[in-house]
Amino acid sequence: MKFALINGIKKTAKPSEVGICICCSSPVRAYCGSERVHHWKHINAVECDSWSEGETEWHREWKNKFDANHQEIILHDPKSGEKHIADVYLKPIDVVLEFQHSPIHIDEIKARESFYKKMIWIVDVHPYKDNISFHNDIGNAVYDCEHAYMETRFKQISKLSKQGKQKKVEELMDDDDVYTYFENIEKRYFPDYFKKKYSSDTANNLLNILEKEREKVKHSSKSLMGYSLSEEYKSRLQSTLYKHLNQPYLLMVWKHKHKRWQHANSPLFFDIGDNYVYRNIENLRYGNGLIVKKYSKASFVSHYKDRK
Ligand SMILES: [Zn+2]
């Protein structure tokens, strides 16, 4: 915890001080080492807020973006007597912000949402950032998602057919929904891309022509000197083509997606440690992709902070 009560006033931790927990009123001691952010900790093991997690630099940075009188606010359920410390509670708009760093169980996601009612999750995915990528080049990225899913399905089919489950195999083979599904995703979130993809005079078309040429070269005995279409060149051309599209959404691919977050109903923002937050808009039904919308942290904070 960042705050404790000393003589009834909310104070931050200073060396060798003792205070009272803002939630359970048990004595707490200040911890002011150099390893972790200065914080208060219960002197005796007590039943306090079971939802509270060890405070990190990351929590502190986020809390500090808001006024001190909105940080670490105790909220009560008058009926059950249950109480919890909200990381940030914006009273004027009655919204709780929860900054979640540690893995959290699905049941707790649900419990917090039902307790706080109006809340927003900000999830620290910085530790996983090497497994996360964002794509402007929707065509390729969607294709990758589709492809990854089809590979998994292929494995499933061969396993099922070895087990002699012919009916299930047929069901899976007949399932074409995946293509329609991805096409709809492109149409809904990347309409400009979708239009451009199918218009006749785009660089995308040029790419296709080059691709066909390359195929021809491959199959002819003559070698064409100096002609190549490397993957790098292709992706450069593609990123130029789609760079200027007005795309408010991005495809985020999270290699080992934490499925538990699919169960969150409240707005969910990912923090990967850059200057933005990425709001989870839709989880792709197949593969590890999510559609996200990107906001600068500054605009996110001022959006909530200044609302009356
Ligand atoms: Zn306590």
Image (cartoon, helix red, strand yellow):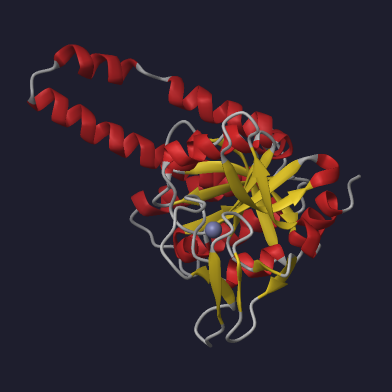
Residue 41 position (above or below residue 142): below
Task: Say which residue appears at 64% left-offset and 77% top-offset.
Answer: 13
Q: Nearer the viewer, residue 288 or 170?
A: 288
Residue at the extreme left: 163
Picture quarter with the N terminus: bottom right
Q: Nearer the viewer, residue 218 or 6?
A: 6
Q: Quadrant of residue 6?
A: bottom right
Residue 161 in percent (x, y) is at 13, 23
Residue 71 in percent (x, y) is at 72, 59
Residue 76 in percent (x, y) is at 65, 40
The reply to whether residue 66 is visible in this rendering is no
Left or right: residue 192 versus residue 187 is right
Residue 251 position (above or below residue 167): below
Left or right: residue 210 versus residue 175 is right
Left or right: residue 192 versus residue 60 is right
Residue at the extreme front: 7
Q: Nearer the viewer, residue 218 or 66?
A: 66
Residue 308 position (above or below residue 38): above
Residue at the extreme top: 167
Picture quarter with the C terminus: top right
Task: Say which residue appears at 43% left-offset and 47% top-offset.
Answer: 257
Q: Quadrant of residue 248?
A: top right
Q: Nearer the viewer, residue 56 or 181?
A: 56
Left or right: residue 118 versus residue 83 is right
Residue 100 in percent (x, y) is at 55, 55
Q: Quadrant of ligand 1?
A: bottom right
